[in-house]
Image (cartoon, rainbow, N blue to C red):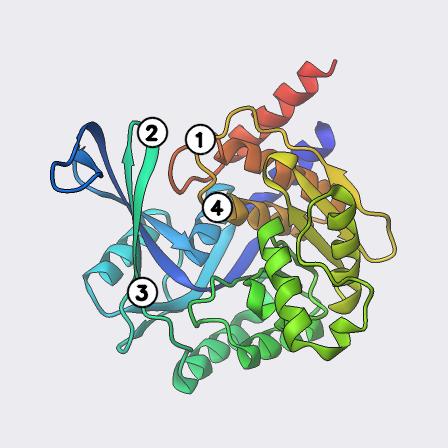
Amino acid sequence: MSAYKNIINKFKNKNILVVGDLILDQHIRGHVSRISPEAPVPIVLQEGAPSYAPGGAANVANNLRTLGAQVALVGRIGDDREGEVFLNELRKRKISTRAVILDQKMPTILKTRVVAQHQQVLRVDREKVDQCSSGLITKILSFIHNNINVFDAIIISDYGKGMITAPLLQDVCDLAKRKKKIIAVDPKDDHFGYYREVTVITPNKKETENAIRNLLITQPDWRELSLNMDRLLTQEDVIKAGEQLLKFLRLESLVITLGEHGMCLFEDGKKPVHIHTRAKEVFDVTGAGDTVISVFTLSLATGASKLQSADLANYAASVVVGKMGTATVTRDELLEAIREEKTEHT
C-alpha cells in the first residue's frame, strides 16, 4: 500500500504529452415509459440539457489531469460550434489547448449517447475520417519537437480517425527514443504495424484479435511466426498471441485488457503476468481503455515498474467501469480502491 501511495503522490510532478484523435462526447439523459407507435423503438423523454465531456485522446488527457498531472493535448477539431464546446470543456479541466489545431476541412467528431434508466439505448456518431494534411502534420511535429524536453512521457491515442499516420508516428517515436522518453500507444487494430519498438501498447482482446487478422493479411514476416489464429478463446491463446506480438513489434511491454477477466502483462525477457479484475460492479465500460493507458504511463513516468504500473491501471479501471458515461478516476478514489482491496484480504 505504501509503495503505491508513493507512486500516486508523484503523479502531480509529471508532464505528459497526449497525441491523438479528438472527440466530443455528448450525453442525453432521460427515461423510457413507452414504445413508439411509429416503429418498435423506445421513446426517451429527455431530462435536462445535454452534457459534454472530452472524448477520444482528450479523455486520456482528462484522466491524466484528474490524477494531478500536467498535460498537453495535440490533435485537431473542426471550426464549428462543437469545436467551441470542446475547447471550453478542456479549459474547464485546465487542459492546455495550445496544440489543438483547427482543421477547416473536418467537422469536430461528435459521439452522442442517449442514456435512459442508467442504460445506453442509442449512440449516434458524426465524423469524417480523413488523414491529416501535410500542413497540419508539420504544425504538430513542430510543436512536439520544440517542447519534447518538458514531457516525461508521450501517449499516442489512436482511434483510427485520421490523426495518427505512419509518418507522424515514426517521427514522434524516433524523437522519443533519442530523448529517452516513454512512449505508450492505445492502438487501432489495423495500425499495429506502426507501433514497433515503443514502450507499451494497450489493446483489448478484440483489438488484438483484429490486429492478428490484419497482420496475417498485410505482413509477410508475421505469417512466418507460429501464431495463425485470430480468435483468442482461452488464456493460453492470449498468452501465445501476446508473446508473438511482443516479439514481432519489438516492444518493451504489452498489456492486453480482458474486460471482466482483468489484463495480461507481457514484458521482454519475462514471463507473462495475469492480473485479475478488481471491478465489483460494471455500469459502463466507456473510456476504460483511456484510463488504463493513462495510469500505466503516468506510473511508469514516476519510476514504477511495469508490473506495478499495470496493477495500478487495473485498480483505476475497476473504479471507472462503476461509473456512467465518459468517466475518470481521482487519486483519492484510486487510493481508496487499493485500501479496500487490501482490507478485504487481511
- Name the N-terminal-most of marks 2 and 4: 4
- Name the N-terminal-most of marks 1 and 4: 4
Closer-to-camera residue (95/226): 226
- Name the N-terminal-most of marks 3 and 2: 2
Element type at mark 2: loop
In the image, what residue type sits under mark 2? His
Residue 187: tell me if it is visible: yes
What is the C-alpha distance between the residues marked 3 and 2?
A: 26 Å
> Which residue position is annotated with label 2?
118
> Does residue 14 sit above or below 1 in this rendering?
below
In the image, what residue type sits under mark 4? Asn
Does the CB distance between marks 1 and 2 fall below 8 Å?
A: yes
Residue in the image at 64% along x and 26% along y: 338
What is the C-alpha distance between the residues marked 3 and 4?
A: 23 Å
> Which residue position is annotated with label 4?
63
- Mark 3 closeness class: few <14, some 14–19, many ≥20 residues within 10 Å: some
In the image, what residue type sits under mark 1? Phe
- Mark 4 closeness class: few <14, some 14–19, many ≥20 residues within 10 Å: many
Apparent side of residue 152 relative to residue 26 in the rendered image (left or right): right
> Which residue position is annotated with label 3?
127
> Residue 27 sits in which quadrant?
top left
> Does residue 315 sit above or below 23 in this rendering?
above
Apparent side of residue 25 relative to residue 14 in the rendered image (left or right): left
Closer-to-camera residue (6/341): 341
What is the C-alpha distance between the residues marked 1 and 3?
A: 26 Å
> Residue 167 sits in which quadrant?
bottom right
Nearer to us: label 1 or label 4? 1
> Does residue 139 sit above or below 271 in this rendering?
below
Does the CB distance between marks 2 and 4 fall below 8 Å?
A: no
